[in-house]
Image (spheres, coloured by chain):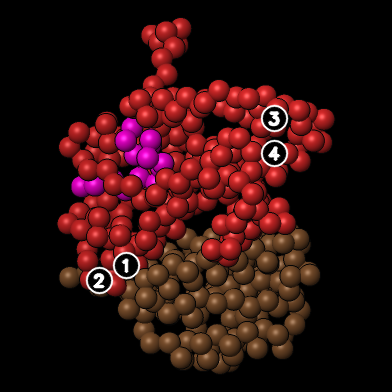
Amino acid sequence: MKPKPEVVVLACTQAVPQPSALRQALQEVGLSGHIIQEPCSSKVEAFHLLRILAKGADLVWVVGCPEQYCQLAEGSTRMGFRVAHAQSYLAELGLETARLGFSRVAAGNPEGLAAVAAEIQQRRKDLPPNPARPRPAA
Amino acid sequence: MIVGQRKSLQELQEMLTGYKKILLAGCDTCVAESACGGRRETAELAAALQLAFQMAGREAELKETSVDRQCIQEFLVDVVAAAQDVDAVLSLACGAGVQALAARLEKIPVFPALNTMFLGETAERGVWLENCRGCGDCQLGYTGGICPISRCAKRLLNGPCGGASNGLCEINMAHAYDPPVPCAWEQICNRLQSLGELERLYTVKPSMDWSKAGAGGPRRVVRPDQRL
């Protein structure tokens, strides 16, 4: 069976038009996260984030555009609210809210992507394995 | 619109103890508008409960469905069908929807995921205000379209109590409300003044008929022309 990725990144296609660049930035800090492209970070719903954690990921990260560059005007702002909303479920469950995070980075900014990757890597390092990971089938 | 609030995950987990196959049933009208029971919130709650059960090492199989209105029989057909192979249903509808569904599932328990709060208005994004108690004897024609029964903390019907300050109800002194609670009677007076109808309040109204508000037992409306 294919191992579940520990880190899942949902990336706005406007902020990260080339997922390979983000993949490379993650690899450079020693992470092989799974990247999912989104048309806009605001398309990421709280239930997406919770479902990914329920599938066993240790950390879920959303990458959106800087708020002033968001092509959907308030999409990136909404993304921040949604991550916070999903975090409120984790807090209620007694799970680390740090298992969900987000960054905002402008397209064509390799230094920005490197900083995002470093932040994800640090956060992953600080977190113990996900205690809600599903048990392997007997 | 009926406004609700989700029960705590702790309460829901306790309610669902002993059930393995659970159907979460959303309702896509009122409680979707008040962001607690629609399709989206059903998916959120299912994922959150999945996490909770996995943390507790508890085996559970969660299914999701959602219909436009759980309070109307015709809309319930799909939920009833989806519930046939589960041990319990967790309904994200208002209390009326939960009961309508429970009445159609004789052998399957139906639990409420929400606390039904009130009839309200979406005042702004993320803020829902109570503005109707369904009293059965609407006074809005007399009070300029502002309900003193739901919006006055003392439910006064004959003018303000005198405790308001700067247009705000005195209950704001006991609790930090965000947004603060305005004095409904000051709003009524201002509204009638701007309509040029302040003299309306000089009319002495007869006492409110509270028997229509539920004091006379469960209420019902029967329309012979609408019945089959």
Mark 4 in CB contact with mark 3 (< 8 angstroms): yes
Mark 1 in CB contact with mark 2 (< 8 angstroms): yes
Give the number of the mark in front: 4 or 3: 3
Asked if residue A87 is positioned above or below residue B31 in the image, the reply reads: below
Q: CA distance from mark 3 to mark 2?
A: 60 Å
Q: Colour of chain A?
A: brown
Label 3 CA crowd tier, 10 Å (few <14, some 14–19, many 20+): some
Find residue B180 and report its horizontal and vertical position in percent. Answer: 63, 58
* Residue B19 vs residue B134, the one in the foreground: B134
Q: Colour of chain B?
A: red
Q: Which chain letter matches label 1?
A: B
Q: Amino acid at mark 1?
A: Ala
Which residues fall within the magenta stretch?
A: B86-100
Instruction: Tell me, for residue B201, which label it has, or none.
Output: 3
Secondary structure beneath dot 1 equals: helix
**Label whose residue precedes the other's in the sequence (3 or 2):** 2
Task: Give the image quarter of residue A62.
Answer: bottom right
Give the number of the mark in front: 4 or 2: 4
Secondary structure beneath dot 3 equals: helix
Say left or right for B48 vs B148: left
Instruction: Tell me, for residue B188, which label it has, or none.
Output: 4
Q: Which chain letter matches label 2?
A: B
Task: Check disc 1 and report the residue beneath it.
Answer: B52
**Label whose residue precedes the other's in the sequence (1 or 4):** 1
Secondary structure beneath dot 2 equals: loop
Q: CA distance from mark 1 to mark 2?
A: 6 Å
Task: Check disc 2 and report the residue beneath it.
Answer: B56
Q: Are marks 4 and 3 on the same chain?
A: yes
Q: Amino acid at mark 2?
A: Ala
Q: Are marks 1 and 3 on the same chain?
A: yes
Q: CA distance from mark 1 to mark 4?
A: 48 Å
